[in-house]
């Protein structure tokens, strides 16, 4: 499989902006995709924020395997990282996020109060990879269309302060990817969930990765969606993809069939799934 890697100039600029603004915020809201909570954690962001207080917000939890999401929240908390899971399209209240932020920043806020400083809004910066649902979540928190929303990477182009309430202000940032992935399957997982522009990867590589994963963890979903038999599961991943290509009426156009499979998975036509597993059995 070909390695997926790049580092567009606008992402280098976004990293510089994050570094420059970190000192003016109290807390970092690190958004990760609940389907890939580990693969969607940018090591560049982790390097920059270091010990800055932060909250991990697992977005798109309605698309992820609920049991795995619960386990990931426990795992993050065991690592000393407060974490919550949200359906970005649901009405997550500003009060909830503010309350959790106040809890994380309790010592700092108490110190300011003891010094007689005037009460002020908590300032948070939101960071995450492209297409993680950041703009959608921000719009919910500020209760208006303050940030552009899109279902593709690269919608947010600059930075802007948003007032969520009298107690919380948010600084939006563009999605940031990193120069090179530690392992091949991290790139495959990001590609499958739509964090990487489709032109950047070979669709058949990602489709084969998807087939291998769903055969192992969600075979029933694969079987029911594509009316597969037990014998079909004896086929290799390549042969199964070729079978699906013919089944889709695409003759030998396996690249087009790969696009169809990827789109089906992104649109949840195979149900909820989590590519990163807390049981240590998945490599992604």
Image: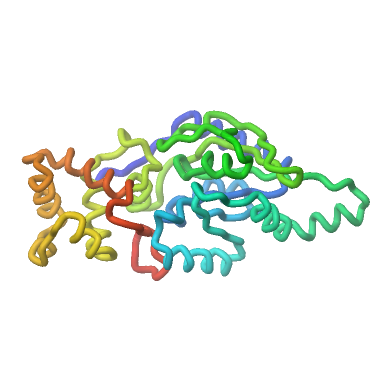
* Image x and y of residue 236, in percent: 12, 58
In this image, 22 relative to 250: left or right?
Answer: right
Residue 2 visible: yes
Q: Compared with residue 236, is residue 137 higher up or lower down, i.e. above or below?
A: above
Q: Compared with residue 254, is residue 184 higher up or lower down, i.e. above or below?
A: below
Residue depicted at 93% across the width and 51% down the height: 116
Q: Compared with residue 92, is residue 203 higher up or lower down, i.e. above or below?
A: above
Image quadrant assignment for residue 272? bottom left
Quarter of the figure with the C terminus: bottom left
* Image x and y of residue 14, in percent: 56, 34
In this image, 49 relative to 220: left or right?
Answer: right
Residue depicted at 40% across the width and 51% down the height: 182
* Image x and y of residue 55, in percent: 61, 55
Residue depicted at 52% across the width and 64% down the height: 73
Relative to the observer, which residue lies in front, 52 or 253? Answer: 253
| Number of numbered tags placed on the structure image | 0
């Amino acid at each position: 499989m070909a390695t997926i890697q790049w580092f567009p100039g606008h992402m280098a600029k976004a990293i510089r902006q994050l570094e420059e603004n970190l000192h003016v915020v109290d807390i970092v809201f690190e958004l990760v995709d609940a389907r890939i909570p580990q693969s969607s954690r940018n090591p560049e962001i982790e390097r920059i924020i270091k010990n800055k207080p932060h909250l991990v917000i697992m977005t798109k939890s309605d698309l992820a395997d609920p049991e795995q999401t619960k386990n990931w929240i426990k795992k993050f908390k065991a690592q000393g990282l407060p974490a919550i899971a949200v359906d970005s399209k649901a009405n997550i209240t500003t009060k909830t996020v503010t309350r959790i932020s106040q809890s994380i920043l309790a010592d700092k806020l108490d110190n300011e109060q003891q010094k007689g400083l005037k009460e002020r809004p908590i300032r948070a910066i939101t960071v995450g990879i492209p297409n993680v649902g950041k703009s959608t979540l921000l719009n919910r928190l500020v209760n208006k269309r303050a940030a552009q929303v899109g279902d593709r990477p690269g919608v947010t182009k600059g930075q802007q302060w948003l007032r969520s309430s009298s107690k919380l202000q948010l600084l939006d940032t563009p999605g940031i990817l990193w120069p090179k992935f530690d392992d091949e399957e991290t790139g495959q997982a990001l590609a499958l969930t739509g964090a990487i522009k489709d032109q950047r990867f070979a669709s058949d590589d990602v489709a084969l990765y998807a087939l291998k994963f769903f055969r192992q963890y969600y075979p029933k979903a694969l079987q029911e969606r594509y009316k597969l038999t037990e014998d079909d599961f004896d086929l290799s991943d390549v042969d199964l993809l070729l079978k699906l290509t013919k089944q889709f009426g695409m003759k030998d156009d396996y690249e087009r069939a790969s696009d169809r499979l990827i789109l089906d998975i992104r649109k949840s036509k195979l149900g909820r799934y989590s590519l990163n597993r807390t049981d240590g059995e998945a490599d992604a």
